[in-house]
Amino acid sequence: MPPIQVRNFCIIAHIDHGKSTLADRLIQSCGGVSEREFRDQILDSMDIERERGITIKSNTVTLMYDAKDGQRYQLNLIDTPGHVDFSHEVRRSLMSCEGALILVDASQGVEAQTVANLYLAMEYELKILPVINKIDLPAADIDRAREEIDADLGLDPFEAVLVSAKLGQGIDELLEAIVEKLPAPSGDPENPTQALIFDAQYDAYRGVVVLCRVKEGTLAPKQTIRLMHTGKEYDIEEVGLLQLKRVKTKELAAGAVGYVIANIKTIRDISIGDTITDVKNPAADPLPGYKEAQPVVFSSIYPMSTDDYADLTKALDKLALNDPALTFEKDSSAALGFGFRCGFLGLLHLDVIQERLRREYDLSLLLSAPSVRYRITLENGETIMIDNPSEYPDPMNISRTEEPFIKASIMMPERYVGVIMELCRDRRGTSSTFNYLSVGRVELTSELPLAEVLFDFYDRLKTVTQGYGSFDYELLDYRETKIVKVDILVNSEKVDALSQLVHEDKARARALRYCERLAETIPRQQFKIAIQGAIGGKIIARKTINAYRKDVTAKCYGGDITRKRKLIEKQKEGKKRMKMVGAVEIPQSAFVAVLKSDE
């Protein structure tokens, strides 16, 4: 199909504004799926996506549309995630498009991630078409949504297409607007081949299936291609379009979005953002590349049973095939055995990976407390990056410690300003500024340490704003801080899996919480068990689990009191000896209870 009849676009929005539902209606309107095969969230392939109603992985589909001008158009649609943790998926989708539909919920208006995604689209110079969704809701306020599109996004509010993705209203008008207002791709099929790899899938029978956007030239079977960054060469076996399943074609010409199968064995052989070119007629330069996703949250994953270690290794390898943002390396703990130190894009990403390991690979897992990466300058001038408490150097050798800061953007109704200010202050927030977006709506911008938003910041935000607050963030820089390593001791033995790096002001509260939870879950023994939180040799928190006490005086039914005292003293001596040699076994349930997020 000539490039003039092709439209490449993606749908971007805040989480839960109806992207996947709109994609469903567009697919149905273009006849991309039969009624019998249709199901809700058809582009969401994972069970966890459909259950939670979120998109985790970007998905591509090619649709054929007969427009009112009598022409047949090829629409390449990419449905993107809305959660801040998966903005790297949005980024690489935008790279392969000329236009974007920015979706605004008519009842909630413009939210934090809507603005963030708009800036991403503007970075790649995309034509943006605003769409107001959920116009069927009783709470829908279309005039307010138009005002916010004008004030917050700087787009023409009267260009916005009104739709109800749930009921299918306005879908025909939207398809016409896509054809009329979004630009056709540029590119010449006769030029040297340049195709951008924006995603990849793994097929057990065919190897790696590369998803690419052809910018210049053509890709066809039996053509020898080179990946410009790695220099590796492959022969193309098959090319085609993604129409919910792979549909084989003769070639992919300039402007097309499709797949390439070229006998690539593992995803590690390619890099997302690489450029494909022809060996015989190569392009002079690669396309501007995609930024690598940088993990910001780190946690160690251990199998509940040591026998499952080999299964966990295989499972992580398979997950990394479809999720290049997941990083992992071998780790070990005296308490929990062998495991992996993993890097994630955020807490939702961590939660999703844990859930997928549990469901898809039937693994019972234990996770250490999430941590961020600290930058530590030693007395000898050397700088090291630390994300694992076990690698924390001797405080005497540390000259300076820095932690990552984020710029948090929180949008909310005006009545919640006080409680949000208090929440930010509690999390060591600085430089808070307000921007009054429209009547009754405020944007609060605050600089916060990333470590402070890891545990339950998002949940607390939703609680105090009764679900109306939205949150987005971007990484700023590293700033000097006071970090201490808190160790947990059970019966004077250090439990390395529970060690954590905490800000000095929060150390006692965190240690006390850990001690209390352990005291609730560790079974009582025949001797007293002291559970302590310590910074170096200084104890900062303690809880005691009292011993079982046998009634040794039950047989004394009379006589001198000294008989009873003698028996009680003898029991005390026995308990002291038992404490010296007795080992406390910490059950897995205790680790699980401790590592739950703050209540």
Image (cartoon, rainbow, N blue to C red):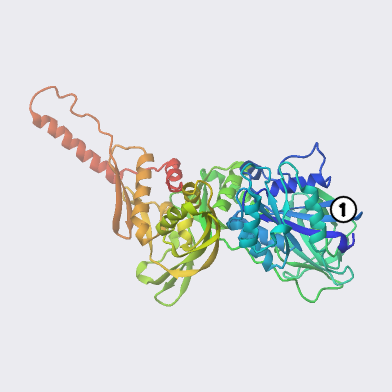
The extreme left residue here reads: 560
The quarter of the picture where the C terminus appears is: top left
Percent coordinates x, y for residue 434 in the rendering: 49, 63
User: Depth check: 397 or 559 in front?
Assistant: 397
| Residue 314 horizontal/vertical position (percent) | 63, 50
**Residue 252 in view in this figure:** no
In percent of the image, x 46 and y 62: which residue is there?
449
In the shown orientation, is residue 219 left or right of residue 136? right
Q: Residue furthest right?
A: 70
Q: On the picture, is 589 further left or further right than 559?
A: right
Left or right of 180? Residue 557 is left
Residue 67 visible in the displayed image:
yes
Locate the N terminus by quadrant.
bottom right
Closest to the observer, 157 or 256? 157
Mark 1 neighbour density, 10 Å: few (under 14) some (14–19) many (20 or more): some
The image shows a total of numbered marks equal to: 1
* Residue 439 in picture, x, y percent from top left: 55, 56
State the SS at label 1: loop
Nearer the observer, 440 or 284: 440
Residue 471 image-quadrant placement:
bottom right
Q: Quadrant of residue 537?
A: bottom left
Q: Amino acid at mark 1?
A: Ala
Which quadrant of the structure image shows residue 190? bottom right
- Judging by the rendered image, the residue that carries numbered circle 1 is 67
